Amino acid sequence: MNRNLARALQVAWGLPEFRSGLRHLIDLDEVSVLLATLAVADHDREVESSLLRLLRSGLDTIEIREAVLLLLEQDQVRRPLVAVAVEPLADRPGQAAAIASAAEDPAVRREIRAVLDSAKVRELIWQAIDDQVSDNRFGLIRRAAVLFVRHPSVRRLAWAARRHGVLRELRRKPGPASVDSAGGGEAPA
């Protein structure tokens, strides 16, 4: 499992607003045990599989999905999660700034909601995650292409992210030639 995802889940779970917002929908003890086990460096793949199944179940349950999306609209919940998500991008300040900017945009969050509201899109996303976990690069690329070509909500989300420079920064190689986070620097010739 992506260790940044695991860390973001642990930070989210550490926020009292997040836990209290989901208390009536999920078993708090089960999630706490899974996250504590995941925090151990030598956890087994079954823990990761259990957590992914729990995440999938949560996204497929409309009440949980809506509660999480509503919580992410709150600045005091969203901002710490975004900070954790961009923390590993210290060597890519432009990408970190673009992601943070996109996360603050209500239009981007609306498009994320639209993407997650579609059962077909969620299924393709989980298939892509399964492909990534099983190191099936071809399957991952194929699913990403299908998502983009067949689902307008995914295209709208991509365009919304593009307005913040997320796509440009994802293509950019890390290193000294990167444009500074303000976007005004020039790469050496």
Image (cartoon, rainbow, N blue to C red):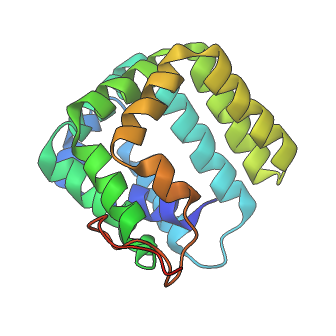
Q: How many marks?
A: 0
Q: Residue at x 50, y 64 (%)?
A: 4
Between 177 and 32, the residue placed more toward the observer is 177
Residue 72 rendering spot, x and y as whole percentages:
25, 40
Taking the view exactly as shown, the residue that stands out farthest to the front is: 189
**Residue 12 in view, yes or no:** no
Residue 11 rendering spot, x and y as whole percentages:
33, 62
Residue 116 rendering spot, x and y as whole percentages:
46, 24
Q: Residue at x 65, y 15 (%)?
A: 150
Is residue 180 left or right of 60 when viewed as pictured?
left
Quadrant of the rendered structure where residue 179 is?
Answer: bottom left
Location of residue 46 with respect to 110 vertically, above or below:
below
Q: Residue at x 55, y 66 (%)?
A: 3
Between 70 and 18, the residue placed more toward the observer is 70
**Residue 92 in view, yes or no:** yes
Q: Looking at the rendering, in which quadrant would you find the N terminus?
A: bottom right
Q: Looking at the rendering, in which quadrant would you find the C terminus?
A: bottom right
Between 2 and 50, the residue placed more toward the observer is 2
Location of residue 150 with respect to 163 vertically, above or below:
above
Is residue 187 left or right of 73 when viewed as pictured?
right
Taking the view exactly as shown, the residue that stands out farthest to the bottom is: 176
Location of residue 99 with respect to 145 vertically, above or below:
below
Location of residue 89 with respect to 45 vertically, above or below:
below
Quadrant of the rendered structure where residue 141 is?
Answer: top right
Is residue 83 left or right of 176 when viewed as pictured?
left
Between 76 and 96, the residue placed more toward the observer is 96
Quadrant of the rendered structure where residue 109 is?
Answer: top left
Residue 106 rendering spot, x and y as whole percentages:
22, 32
